[in-house]
Amino acid sequence: MVSRAYSVAFQGVEARMVEVQCAVTAGLPAFSIVGLPDKAVSEARDRVRTALTSMAIALPSKRITVNLSPADLPKEGSHFDLPVAMALLAALDILPDDVTQNTVALGELSLDGTLVPVVGALPAAMAAAEHNRGLLCPAGSGAEAAWVGSTQVIAAATLGDVVRHYTGQNPLPPAEPGEVPDAPQGRDLRDVKGQERAKRALEIAAAGRHHLMFVGTPGSGKSMLAARLPSILPPLTPAEALETSMIHSLAGLLDEGGISRARPFREPHHTASMAAIIGGGRQAKPGEVSLAHNGVLFMDEFPEFPRMVLETLRQPIETGEVMIARANAHVKYPCRFMLVAAANPCKCGYLSDPERACARVPQCGEDYLGRISGPLMDRFDLRVDVPPVAFTDLDLPASGEGSAEVAARVAEARAAQTSRYTGLANMRVNADAEGDLLEEIATPDSEARALLVKAAERFNLSARGYHRVIRVARTIADLDGSETVRHPHIAEAISFRLAAPAIA
């Protein structure tokens, strides 16, 4: 007789169902696991055997074979310990067979039978709900998995608790979702002295999820401005929070089962590898572009990143997803993020300052910013020169608008876009609009179109640049509360599209 339990194998954010089959047959005593397991899965037999021994359950002197079906799907991770144990317990008539067949299980076993939390509980719960099964997981993963809501989640602390629950000796209550932590108090835009044009660019970028680049001398406030971007972004919608949390669950970044409504803000160091930025590694883990999904990817010292790493950003920026290709699998992750880059105008950093610039002007700047290819630079919707702030301005008291006032305008603009794109797949903000839809929602009036055509001819805008100007203008119109895209909106969008003086 073959007993069955179920678990999942992760391919990106997709959790594929795996049937764990166990047969106890006559023959020389042995315990083998087949079905393309990795090292961690193969070692499950020793953890399961020892955990059962700690519960005073002796394995019979027979041949125990566990098959993970489908056999051609790679199985990775220690979360297969619990389903292997459940299938074996069902084969020994300790657990009812119908219970194990109606439950998706995942969890790592300690040698004493304690269940250790594992990554991926949230996407596993989604897969269980799709197949009309319940989910069994370690106690430390229950609060995370319970957010799905459409399936019953049982979170057990030990393997003994699992046996007592399913045999009716001591039933466990369903797990409850973790609490939503309050968004941390971010830094306020009011702290930034001057830089009104850069603040305006931040507001436009936040309202329409447009890519933004700051270029300026060292200490001019580029990183300071970017660090305050989260304070003006609207919270994640429930659908966005679930999408983002599934990726963070696979990366093991969810804190005690809590799903945050704050948008991700990732800032990798410029020494990061391609696998760290795009994703990859032994188990094709999500990279920074995916961890920033629905949020911000801030790349300071942008030209210092390896050229190959920068070039790999081009496709994810356009498609909103990244495909990690391996010999045995192709893993896809979503990555709709806002790219914010900061760079000095040249290697020494003082290209625009005649008193401090090096003797290699202008080659110093051309060589340095030349590390950023033209096609990648063309993907930035907003380019801003950030001049140094005078010392006299630093002594002035804080003035101007704070993050709360700007965030209110951004929220209104986002609400208008949410209403506009309701019912349209993969479209939530103006940065997603393209083709006929973009022409429909952002058609400039006659005066604005004449200005746009003139600017496109005068500055030799590419087709991508032309459409990105229209998208930015649509966002500016949303901030202005205007139904139509008018001349001032196009003019402002063009002013941000043109290369900053330091780049030219």
Image: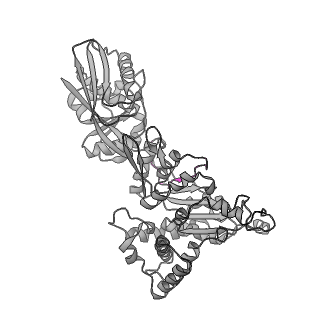
Q: Does residue 29 lie above or below 177 as drawn?
A: above
Q: Is residue 357 left or right of residue 47?
A: right
Predominant SS along the magenta part:
loop
> In x, y percent, where is residue 425?
34, 63
Q: Is residue 224 visible?
A: no
- In the rendered image, the quadrant that contains the N terminus is top left
The residue that appears at 34% across and 14% down in the rendered structure is 56
Q: Does residue 13 lie above or below 391 as drawn?
A: above
Determine if the magenta segment contains residue 265. yes
- In the rendered image, the quadrant that contains the C terminus is bottom right
Q: Is residue 149 left or right of residue 90?
A: right
Of residues 95 and 496, which is closer to you in this image?
496
Of residues 5 and 44, which is closer to you in this image?
44
Residue positioned most to the bottom: 447
The residue that appears at 59% across and 68% down in the rendered structure is 383
Q: Does residue 281 lie above or below 382 as drawn?
A: above
> In x, y percent, where is residue 423?
32, 66
> In x, y percent, where is residue 217?
71, 63
Determine if the magenta segment contains residue 391. no
> In x, y percent, where is residue 237?
42, 58
Q: In the rendered picture of this protein, how many numbered marks are placed on residues?
A: 0
The residue that appears at 23% across and 30% down in the rendered structure is 4
Segment tinted magenta in the rendering: 257-271
Q: Does residue 394 lie above or below 103 as drawn?
A: below
Image quadrant where residue 320 sits = bottom left
